[in-house]
Each structure stands twice: as C-alpha cells, then as structure tokens.
Amino acid sequence: MSYPYQINSFEEYQQAYKKSIEQPEEFWASVAEHFTWRKKWDKVLNWNFTEPTIEWFKGAKLNITENCIDRHLEKLGDKPALIWEPNNPEERVRIVTYNRLHKRVCQVAQMLKNNGVKKGDRVCIYMGMVPELAYAVLGCARIGAIHSVVFGGFSAQSISDRLEDAKAEFIITCDGAYRGEKTIPLKSVIDDALIGNKTVKRIIVFTRTRTPVSMLKGRDVWWEDEMDYAEEQVEKNGVVSFEPEIMDAEDPLFILYTSGSTGKPKGVVHTTAGYMLFTNYSFVNIFNYKQGQIHFCTADIGWVTGHSYIVYGPLSAGATSVMFEGIPTYPDAGRFWDIIDKHKINILYTAPTAIRSLMGFGTKPLENKNLSSLQVLGSVGEPINEEAWHWYDEHVGKKRCPIVDTWWQTETAGILISNFAGITPSKPGWATLPMPGVQPILVDENGNEVLPKENETIAGNLCIKAPWPGIIRTTYGDHERCRTNYFATYQNLYFSGDGALKDKDGNYRITGRVDDVLNISGHRIGTAEVENAINMHVGVVESAVVGYPHAIKGQGIYAFVIVSSKHSDDELTRKDILQTVTRVIGAIAKPDKIQFVAGLPKTRSGKIMRRILRKIAEGEVENLGDTTTLLDPNIVDEIKNGRI
Ligand code: WT7
C-alpha cells in the first residue's frame, strides 16, 4: 500500500518539485493534511535567513508520538514496528508490535514523569542499540522532554561537555553495551562524566550486560524497577494510556551534537512538526516505501541517521524498522547478509565505509545467503566511490535493486539530495536531484552563483536558498553560533560546508567538505577538536590535523605534532597521544598517523598553511604550490622527508 503523497513516476517527481518551489506553503500543507494534529496551523511558513528565524506550521499543536504510534494502532497494532536483532545471533530476536511499542512508550513517559522530568527538560540518553533506546527517545517526546542522544563511542569528557552545554538534569543509560566481542561499560563512563557535575539529578539504568555498576542512593535508579511501577499506572483493566503532552509545532524535539570547523561540538536543535513531516516524506519517497516492507537502516541511533531513518521517519509512516545491536563483522563478515536473509529485509540503508570494509572479505560471506527479499539499497554518510557502488549493486542488489545515494547532514534532519528508488534515474557517485522543497545553489568563494556555460558541469560550494521543514532551527543555548556557522558565510543562504558538482541535467555530485571538518567512516570530526585533544597531552607543544584518503574509512586522520624535547621516545609518546585523544573525545577520533615534526608551515602572520599539510598527507609531495609566503620554507622539506 502506498501513501497519498507518494511519488510514483519521474513526471510526478517533476510536478511535485515544481509545485514545491512555486507554492511551498500549499505543497507542504497538502502533505501535512495526512498527519494527526490537535490543532491545525495558522501559517505554514515564516522565515528569514538573516537572524535566522524559521517557523513551520506556526500555531499548530501535536505530539509526534501520536503520529508515530497511536494513529497506527487501529490498523497496525499487531504489526511489527521494530524488529530487534541482538549482537549475538544466538540470542532471541525481539519483535515489538505497534501495540507493544505504545505500551512501552507510555510506560517510559510515566517513568520519566515519576522521576521529575517535565516538558522542556533535557534528557541525555547514552545507551547501546537496544529497543529500550527507541522507547527512551519516544518516551521523552511523549512528555515533551528534549532528548539528547550521545553515541556510545564518545568518552566521559565528551559526555560531560554535552551535559553541561544542554544543562541536562536527567540521564538514561545502560550498565553496558555489546559491540561485537566487546562490552562497553556505559554506566561507568557516565560516572566518570559526572565527576564535578552538579546539575544531573537522576540516572535511570537499563540492565543489558550485567556489568557491575555503582548505583548511588538518591541519584541512580534501575529502569526495570521504575518501568514495573509505571506499568501499574498506565495500564488499567487491560487498557494502556498515557496522555501525550500537547506540543507547539516549533517546540524543540531534540538536540544532537555535531562537530564543526571550530570549537566544541554544537547542539543542533530540531523542532516537532517540520522534523516529523520532512523525515516521513523523505523516507516514504526516497526509499519508495510501501506499507508492509521491512526497512533496515544500519546506523546507530546516536547519529542523526538513526533518529530520522530508524525511529521517526519509519515509525511515523507505520513502517517496520529493524534495529541491529551489533557490528557488520561479528561473528563474521556475513552478518548483514544473515540478517537480510533471516528477517526478509526489503530495504537496506548503510554507509560506504561499511560496504568497503565488507568488500575486503570478498564474496564468500555472501554465498548461500538469500538476499532475494531486497528491493532497494541506500547509501549515506559520505560520497560513495564507484568501486563500492558497483560491488553493492552487483553482489548485494544482484543488479535488480535501485541504489539511492542520499546526501544530507545532521543540520538538515533528513535527505536533501538523492535519487528516488526506481522512480528517478541514478548515476553512480552522484546524489542526483533535490527533494521537493529543496533548492540547492552552487556559489563561488564570494557567494556569487556559479552559472553553467552551455552543457558544462560546474563546481561550487553547496548552499540552499530557502528553508525546507527539517532545517536546523538553532544551536542550543547559542543562536548566534547557528547564524555564523550556517547563515553568515553567504548572505541569505544556508551553507552546507560541502563542495559539489552539478551536471547539465541538474544532477549533483557531492565532492566533500570544503571546511576543516573530517568525515571518518561517516562520522563527523572537526580538525580543531582533534588538535585540542592532542594538545592536552603534556608533551605536545603544537599540532595540526588534516584528513587524507583512507581505503576503508573514506578519510583518515593525519596529525603533525611538535613535542617538547623531554619527550623523545616517539613510540611511547605516540601511544600516549592516542590515549589522550581517546579520553578527550573517544576512540573514533584517534589519529591514524602521527608524524613528529620540528615546526609547522606558517604564514608570516602565524596561520598554519593546512593546504600544504593536506597535500603532504595525501602523498602529493611534488606539487605543493606557492610556499614563498611561508615564515620558514625549509620546514616543508623536512616534513616531506619525514612523511609516514
Ligand atoms: C556530512 C554530514 C547524513 C547523515 C550522516 C552524516 C557527508 C553525507 C553524503 C552523501 C556525499 C555525504 C557530507 C555532509 N555526506 N551523506 N550521500 N554523499 N557526502 O551526517 O555527521 O551530519 O555529516 O556527511 O560531507 O556534510 P553528518
């Protein structure tokens, strides 16, 4: 079964696109008609990009969980909302029907209320990929609390910074999380994060791994106890209910921290109605989702992909969404294919880095796996190289599944540029055409639109001209930071930080970041962040971090480091630095290469010439461009010679 706003042909796409640009308010209102509102909007869109102020569906009242759960109960109550595949394939699968999801989310909402959480409060969620994570997210949304999910790979220091920035008083966590062979002691990391913290009042701990944990009286409580108690409150005579908090369209739904080119990660804020509409509309149309299909997004809910395409997009569409606790290579490199076979997955949405790492195991792990249920494949997180695209097409999709290459960002909430599965043409390596409602524009350094001469492919910095419903509204606690980061580089444009090409047919190819942001295995990390972490090591005088092409991760981290003379044991210092970065940010930010240098190439004004370092890291040592403006041009030769 399809959706009233489902696009079924290229012509329909063109019509929808045209309408969305010419009459954006009518266009999005006609989509919004198909959702559950407690009160309809007064105005579809108010905006200016100077402050910025962006308001979608102002005056409307709703609760997103009513749209993700309650409204489906009559027809889909017994249908699976979530299928949970555990880390260990021997362990029991959990199938959560919409009825069961409703009950659990009502219980979590009640549990949060019992623990003093109110509308607008920030709840930090630091859990592994267990169904309870989805319940926690939705439970917050049900009472109007703002969730801030922190990926389980971040360090205590990173959590501490995020807790402080969000002034969070509540945490939901697990004793531990399973990831392949490893058990990660989540509660213990939280305990470290809370040393010196005075704002957190309550921690709710879900038992997953039975890892011993410290439980402080008056502060820490067990999820299981609290949920049992809440169950008695929400279930009366077999009827489950918890009245959802009625939210304004523009009330914040969540904060998600992401890295930029400067400073600490910023809390991207998404609001209720626009986010819901955009994730739903993009999910249904880009994957060409039909009711009853089984959708498997392999991301972690700690990242935006999990928020939008495991939880909110699919559930608001009444879909069946698969949640996988483990990793693609455990117990072996055939795990994804086993899951597809076992659950008869129809849509697989994963990252190029996962495809490349599985490619490394050859096609043997695919033998005897029945992948015939697959209908659509998706890619997200970084540009997909042609080799990976063709492997995905040939060995996974067996040349019969369209591949959607979906370009978007934490700040955009949902997919902005992508082909539509089986509906609009694909082009390997190209994200292709914009979603309805999205108006990309390529500009040069001065913000002037790059215009094609006849039939020419053009290149420029990728900006968007007008708001779509999922656009970032603010950065938590610091609106000015939102303005300067995204809306001040080019006047009246949202700047993505990416560079792109556009061909004569209007297709876009994303070429990568044009700022100092790295994309490591699809994870976003700022070079400044890594430098700050490295510089915290006692022996480090100064450092400069750049990215370089990495066969599996897409980009690797290359650090040029000046250490003081006392620290002369290179190997030990290298390990100490890695340990420091792991402590400060998390293992995902560990440099792949550390080169000790005597100096860094700087201009006379003291600015590090990253362009030169990037070239050296990329192995392009011959053609370094103009080095005459350097303070000490000799340093370049020295760095070149010491290249790792
Ligand atoms: C950055 C956003 C989008 C959710 C996951 C990452 C890069 C993302 C693609 C793609 C080329 C892509 C961009 C973007 N990116 N998808 N299909 N093709 N590049 O979210 O952490 O906010 O990172 O990921 O550089 O700016 P994120």
Image: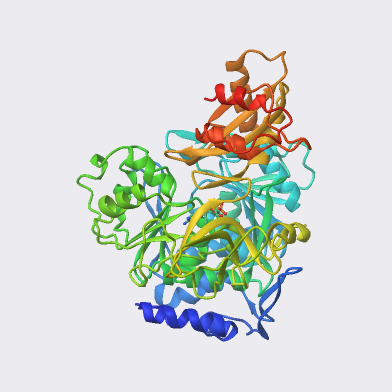
Q: What residue appears at the point 71 percent right and 27 percent down from the top-left corner? A: 632
Q: How is the image coloured?
A: rainbow
Q: Is residue 137 above or below residue 590?
A: below
Depth order, front residue of 303/627:
627
Q: Is residue 333 left or right of residue 227?
A: left
Looking at the rendered image, the quarter that the N terminus falls into is bottom left
Q: Is residue 218 above or below residue 408?
A: above
Depth order, front residue of 447/338:
447
Residue ranking furthest to the left: 368
Q: Position of residue 83 (x, y in %)?
A: 40, 57
Q: What residue appears at the point 33 percent right and 38 percent down from the top-left corner? A: 360
Q: Position of residue 348 (x, y in %)?
A: 36, 57
Q: Is residue 328 above or below residue 38?
A: above
Query: Which picture quadrant has residue 283?
Result: bottom left
Q: Position of residue 127 (x, y in %)?
A: 56, 47
Depth order, front residue of 321/634:
634
Q: Is residue 632 left or right of residue 12?
A: right
Q: What residue appears at the point 51 percent right and 68 percent down from the top-left corner? A: 452
Asked if residue 586 shows in the view, the reply is no
Query: Which picture quadrant has residue 37?
Result: bottom right
Asked if residue 495 shows in the view, the reply is yes
Q: Position of residue 341 (x, y in %)?
A: 27, 53
Q: Is residue 202 left or right of residue 81?
A: right
